[in-house]
Amino acid sequence: MIQLDVNGKQQQLDVTPDTPLLWALRDTLHLTGTKYGCGEALCGACTVLVDGAPMRSCSVPVSAVAGRKITTIETVDKHRVGKAVQEAWRTLDVVQCGYCQSGQIMSAVALLSRNRKPSDSDIDNAMSGNLCRCATYVRIRAAIHEAAKALV
Amino acid sequence: MNTIENLSRRRFLQGSAGLTLGFCLPALAAPAAGPGKAGEGAVGPIHFEPNAFLRIGTDNSVTVISKHLEMGQGTYTGLATILAEELDADWNTVRVEGAPADAGRYNNLFWGPAQGTGGSTAMANSWEQMRRAGAAGRAMLVSAAAIKWRVPATEIAVRDGVVSHAKSKRRATFGELAVAAATLPVPTDLKLKNPKDFRLIGKQAKRKDSADKTSGQARFTQDVQLPGMLVAVVAHPPRFGATVKSFDAGRARAVKGVVDVVQIPQGVAVLATDTWSAKKGRDALSVSWDESQAFKLGSDEILARYRELAKTPGLVAHQSGDAGQAFGKAAKVIRASYDFPYLAHAAMEPMNCVIRLGDGRCEVWNGEQMQTGDQHALAGLFGLKPEQVSIHMLYAGGSFGRRASSQSDYVLEAAHIVKAIGGKAPVKLVWMREDDMRAGYYRPLFHHALEAAVDGNGQLSGWRHRLVGQSIMAGSPFASGMIKDGIDLVSVEGAANLPYAIPNMKVDLHTPQDIPVPVLWWRSVGSSHTAYSTETFLDQVAAAMGRDPVALRLELLARHPRHAGVLKLAAEKAGWGTPLKPGLPGERRGRGVAVHESFNTFVAEVAEVTVARDGSVKVDRMVCAVDCGIAINPDNVRAQVEGAVGFALSAALHGEITLKEGHVVQGNFDGYPPLRIHEMPVVDVHIVPSTAAPTGIGEPGVPPAAPAVANAIAAATGKHLTRLPFNSAELAA
Ligand code: FES
Ligand code: FES
């Protein structure tokens, strides 16, 4: 049994300790907003926040995050920054297929939580680990600036 | 909402021909809503056919049923916009639902009797149909109000989901009239709006899927969980054509969570209670493969063969004038040849499919793009009738053509697994990224050879274009219509119909039959390579003639006003002819243009690039002009072109699937890297105002992007790149 703190709830999971956090979230806790894209920390679709920092959940075993605060897309709107990012994404209709967008949003939330006025190159640095095959990058960039404005 | 479907709608579900608009009613069953037209013979394209595209709830909800897959291209929003426009619905109350698999009601009107999504046809084939569906609903609501209020229908107005009669000051919402409207006959004589009265079409209708896709609530195939469901991960053959010789499942079965291991025609499947256990089990399998029949060539050898083939004449796809004579008399001949690699679609959601068998039925959950083809394939495997295969069309995490598998490949793989376990549990087949990238169904590798003749008067007098590459349509359900006299029309699209006024032209094609690498349509299909070779070669010709690329094109496009229109617009918005701001020391900058028609949509793009000393290319800005007829959702047109530019640049800068001795080299995003945010240019999109019927926008932004960039690189460096993806070593200063 592994104990995880996910979205403010304590969860007991009967999974092997090597199970990546991604699959524990998706298949055991049925939090399917976090996506699988590559399994190798190459695409960012699986990004969640662990103690506020972005992590590729496909490449972190559950044993490594036991007891740490994990936040997923499902509760992102419970936090001021998350709400602002989500709103900006909706205002600008960023999404296309949407599959990468949970990860994009989590990375953007992490960025704006530590940097309220990111420059374009801050955005490049923080977001370049998140692939979008639909290439919604123009709007991702614009939405991050938009959210930053709303957070002033 | 407490609703049931009315009788007519239920009659459909029972398989008998009935009608059309399903008004959603509370509690009691409403009388049947009058006769529809189903069964009255074949329905031609773009005629109103009995449909079930609309439900109105007593809670004022307006549900539009989408017959097309939402895979990012904005179809759900687009179809709903068209219908809601004619219905005069309140956009905020409109929601969209995916249609079931039922080609009788939901066929693609451009595909005859088949249901499916592709070829940028969703808006174009549905335009009239959705307008009529909305107008019929509106007319029935108006009639219901007229009867209730005893006023002439002509005095009734509808706006934003409210029906009103000014003189008597009466008003009612759609929901309040739904019950009464459902009892009325469906009108056949419909009046559609004058486009100048549009309030949603051409305006800003927000995407319907934004909320769910920004909260983790959107449901993709990957997210399906059914009671008792098993997850399957498969060991696939290491080469195309290899089969299982034998396998040892001992270590796989020892993995906690693994429930079963079965052999299927596609390999060996490990079934487990969850994805991670299934993957661990798959990785623990030891399989020995029979590779005696496997394909063992590499991309280099395939290319070498194609180059040899290109020395001999192929089947003629287009001929006008006398090219032989033009080249015989030419004052100058320009030549170039091009190599295009295999490309994977690499949709962000790897292929997957959920299938449940039982009670003489097969139930499928899938980002479903080819309903009719998949229904037949599954029915064949299970010994069912196609209508016993029901399909839940979920959101697709991208496709770019991949989910429209001509052979139902991954869907059948899931089905074989369910069959191998005797249907005892529902199965979710999950492909890991490597399974997806190595499964084939690529954009075919192509080789092109081009020649142009310039006559003594300095005029472009001849053009010869030879293409070598596998057929996509061969063996697909579209083969009979799309292969004419041995020519796969999509192999030569964009080349055989080159719009330029060149008096003597010849386009011919070799279609190698002995390369078994599975190939498939990849966003923009043939135009993904023909636009590149034709548009960059024309720039080489322009350079040789000492002509400006835009001026030469405009001269040659005198009889193609829509091509010329987008070209002028893009050139003007990009400041064509004005000097570019110079780069930093050592940097070379350039501007390039390309124009191309695909799927009846016209797109011109002007690229601005910076080439660094080491030859690396940064695309700074793309200025795009689009003529897609009436732009149903201008913001979505912009979004699709932005995305298309990024998609095309992924291929131009990085994209290559390589075979080595029959093995696919790349397996994940390290070897096959899509564009990342820091590589994305600024994209300006300009839409040509139009009153023509809408055409597609999912694909047409792709073809001009790479050639525009290549032409910009040539302007900056003098080097014309003829091999994709670009090799920065060729550009080092
Ligand atoms: S799935 Fe974790 S980074 Fe791609
Ligand atoms: S929206 Fe499709 S991958 Fe990003």
Image (spheres, coloured by chain):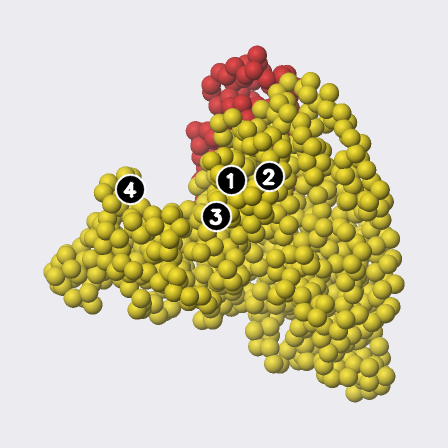
Chain colours: A red, B yellow
Cα distance between the residues tagged 3 and 2:
16 Å
Could you tell me which secondary element the residue under label 2 belongs to? helix
Could you tell me which secondary element the residue under label 1 belongs to? strand
For the image, the number of numbered tags is: 4
Q: Position of residue B185 (x, y in %)?
A: 25, 60
Q: Is residue B524 left or right of residue B267?
A: left
Q: Which circle's residue, 2 or 4, is located before the other in the chain?
A: 4
Q: Which residue is label 4 attached to? A: B3
Could you tell me which secondary element the residue under label 3 belongs to? helix
Q: Position of residue B607 (x, y in %)?
A: 67, 61
Task: Please give the name of the residue rendered at 65% of the width and 36% of the height, measured from the top-left corner.
Answer: B431
Give me the disc on residue B387: 3
Q: Which circle's residue, 3 or 4, is located before the other in the chain?
A: 4
Q: Chain of mark 1?
A: B
Q: Chain of mark 4?
A: B
Q: Amino acid at mark 1?
A: Cys
* Mark 2 Cα shell of 10 Å, populated few (<14), some (14-19), many (≥20): many
Q: Quadrant of residue A90?
A: top left
Given this view, does label 4 or label 1 mark the residue nearer the observer? 1
Q: Amino acid at mark 2?
A: Ala
Q: Which residue is label 2 attached to? A: B415
**Residue in the foreground of this view, choosing between B585 and B629:** B629
Q: Which circle's residue, 3 or 1, is located before the other in the chain?
A: 1
Cα distance between the residues tagged 3 and 4:
25 Å
